[in-house]
Image: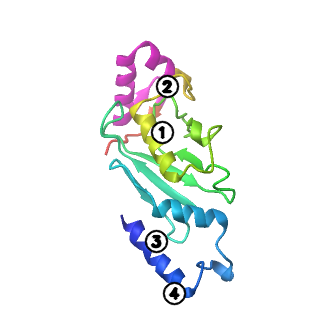
Amino acid sequence: RQYQARIFGQKKDEESAGGNRAGAGGKKASAAQLRIQKDINELNLPKTCEISFPDDDDLLNFRLIISPDEGFYKGGKFVFSFKVGQGYPHDPPKVKCETMVYHPNIDLEGNVCLNILREDWKPVLTINSIIYGLQYLFLEPNPEDPLNKEAAEVLQTNRRLFEQNVHRSLRGGYVGATYFERCLK
C-alpha cells in the first residue's frame, strides 16, 4: 500500500505545479509514463500479490511478488520483473520470472508464456490484467502451451509426480539434472 500514498502525493504536487510532473530537465511525462501512472493508481492487487519499485522515480521498472495460497505452488514466493517500454500501452511490458521455477509455462531462464504478453495483448489491457494472468498460471498451469516441455509432459501424464517435482523445487533441490533454489515464504 505504500506505493499508493506516494503516487497520490505525487498527483497533488502535479496539480499544484499546474500540469504534468516534469521529469529531469523539465520534459513532460511520456504517454507510457502517464498510462503506467494511471494503471498503478488503479491497481487492485489480489491478497497474494505485492508490488515494489526499486527506484521510486521510475514507474516503468518494478517487481511483482506472487505468493500463491492454494494449488501446486502454495507457500512459494515468486518474483517477476516488469519493464515497461515507451511503446506502452500499444506494446506489452517485458515480464520475466526472477525465481527459477518448475512450471510448464515458465522456462528455466524466466521467460513467461502468457497469451496477453504476446499475441493477445491489447492496449485496453492493464498491469492489473497481467498480474491476474500471472497469478492464474500458478493456480492453473497450462500444459497445452508450454515453455518447459518436460514439466508440461509430466503434468499431463502423472499429476502426482508433477506435484512432487514442484514441491521438491520449492523446498530447494534437484528435479532431474536441474537444481532449484528454495523459494518457500
Image disc number at residue 177: 2
Residue shown at 63% from the left, 77% from the top: 23
Horizontally, residue 17 falls left or right of residue 102, namely right
Instruction: Please say whether residue 53 is visible from this viewpoint.
Output: no
Q: Nearer the viewer, mark 1 or mark 2?
A: 1
Residue that numbered label 4 is attached to: 16
Q: Nearer the viewer, mark 4 or mark 3?
A: 4
**10 is higher (above) or lower (below) than 54:** below
Q: Nearer the viewer, mark 2 or mark 3?
A: 3
Spatial separation of the CA atoms under disc 2 and disc 3: 45 Å
Q: Could you say which quadrant of the image residue 162 lies in?
A: top left
Q: Position of residue 74 (x, y in %)?
A: 32, 36
**Quarter occupied by the N terminus:** bottom left
Spatial separation of the CA atoms under disc 2 and disc 4: 59 Å
**Tell me, what colour scheme is on the image?**
rainbow
Image disc number at residue 100: 1
- Whether pointer 4 and pointer 1 mark residues with C-beta atoms closer than 8 Å, the reply is no
Spatial separation of the CA atoms under disc 3 and disc 1: 31 Å
Number of other residues with Cα within 10 Å of mark 2, as a class: few under 14, some 14 to 19, many 20 or more: few
